[in-house]
Image: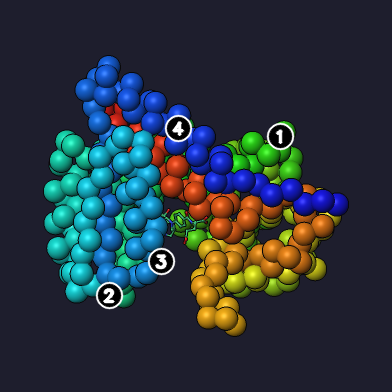
């Protein structure tokens, strides 16, 4: 079987082109320019790359970007005060706190301080509850939303398919399960305590991997014809001292077995950012009376 690559980069580029047109229309018709505030605390190099990409894409679609780069020593109270100000600022339609936060800060308390109608990461209890109830008017976390869009494009129907998700985080695994359940998939979530995850993976029509463990999923875990969404982005140093990005799936080993797979880089990552812009546009539109 020839494994087809799922091109997230071009999917994201199509999405952002459409969003840019819609931003222009919103400005012309309603005099509203969507504004996104991003809070980055500390100097995590990967987070710095993602936040830079977010800013670049925000400008590219014609939105305003408000960057808050805070030192590692910033206190919980200072971050909560900043969020309280951003919650009230009418120029800001979306607020996100880049994760992970430095040790000593309580990420949950900080995220829950974001007003739900500006929570474009979809991580507050309000938006999590909306998703669980199947309400369509909440914000859906960007990575699982992107994965769903890619699956809908690649597969004619998701109904009845067995989706196995490896990883149960609030950012990815849990919302992904809710979304696929609503699409009519039979969903299995595997996590750190799951026995024999390879056995579950072999039963998957769709396998979604978001663990942060480089190449955890081996070729022997994959049955012929599975569609794989690899959410992992792991930076490794090669023997010749170069940095390389690899996924949570041993890519070379699954070629020839999987029907389709998202590459790393160029798979899920770019679509995550496009979904952030999609949610920010929605947040701005929601302010129209
Ligand atoms: N508050 C949030 N924090 C984090 C999220 C999130 O959705 N909200 N997700 C990830 C990081 N992330 C976005 O924030 C993200 C990761 C990777 C990419 C991306 O475009 N990756 C490229 C490679 C880029 C590179 O490292 O060179 C690719 O896969 O092709 C976008 C967004 C954790 N934190
Ligand atoms: Mg990718």
Number of numbered discs visible in the structure rendering: 4
**Is residue 91 positioned above or below 288 on the image?**
below
Q: Is mark 3 within 8 Å of ligand 1?
A: yes
Of labels 4 and 3, the one closer to you: 4
Q: Are marks 3 and 1 in contact (CB under 8 Å)?
A: no
Give the residue pinned by disc 2: 104
Q: Residue 157 at what x, y percent from top left?
A: 71, 34
Give the residue pinned by disc 3: 46
Q: Residue 179 at what x, y percent from top left?
A: 56, 43
Please report the residue visible at 41 percent of the width from the left and 31 percent of the height from the top.
19
**Is residue 282 positioned above or below 40 on the image?**
above
The quarter of the displayed image where residue 203 is located = bottom right
Query: Which secondary structure, mark 1?
Result: loop
The dot on residue 17 is: 4
In space, the residues marked 4 and 3 are separated at their CA atoms by 26 Å
The dot on residue 157 is: 1
- Which of the two labelled residues, at mark 3 and mark 1, occupies the earlier sequence position? 3
- Which of the two labelled residues, at mark 1 and mark 4, occupies the earlier sequence position? 4
Dot 4: few (<14), some (14–19), or many (≥20) neighbours within 10 Å?
Answer: few
């Amino acid at each position: 079987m020839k494994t087809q690559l799922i091109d997230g980069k071009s999917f994201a580029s199509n999405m952002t082109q459409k969003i840019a047109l819609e931003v222009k229309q919103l400005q012309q018709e309603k005099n509203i320019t969507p504004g996104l505030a991003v809070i980055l605390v500390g100097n995590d190099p990967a987070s710095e790359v993602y936040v830079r990409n977010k800013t670049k894409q925000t400008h590219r679609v014609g939105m305003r970007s408000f960057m808050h780069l805070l030192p590692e020593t910033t206190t919980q109270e200072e971050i909560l005060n900043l969020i309280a100000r951003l919650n009230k600022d009418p120029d800001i339609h979306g607020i996100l706190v880049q994760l992970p936060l430095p040790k000593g800060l309580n990420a949950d308390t900080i995220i829950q301080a974001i007003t739900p109608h500006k929570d474009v990461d979809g991580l507050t209890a309000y938006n999590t509850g909306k998703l669980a109830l199947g309400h369509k008017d909440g914000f859906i976390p960007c990575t699982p939303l992107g994965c769903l869009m890619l699956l809908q494009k690649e597969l004619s129907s998701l109904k009845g398919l067995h989706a196995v998700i490896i990883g149960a985080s609030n950012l990815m695994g849990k919302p992904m399960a809710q979304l696929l359940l609503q699409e009519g998939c039979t969903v299995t979530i595997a996590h750190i305590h799951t026995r024999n995850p390879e056995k579950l993976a072999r039963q998957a029509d769709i396998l979604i991997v978001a663990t942060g463990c480089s190449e955890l999923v081996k070729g022997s875990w994959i049955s012929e014809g599975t569609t794989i969404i690899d959410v992992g982005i792991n930076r490794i140093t090669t023997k010749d001292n170069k940095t390389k990005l690899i996924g949570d799936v041993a890519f070379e080993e699954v070629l020839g077995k999987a029907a389709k797979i998202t590459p790393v880089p160029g798979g899920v990552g770019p679509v995550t950012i496009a979904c952030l812009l999609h949610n920010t546009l929605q947040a701005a539109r929601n302010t129209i009376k």
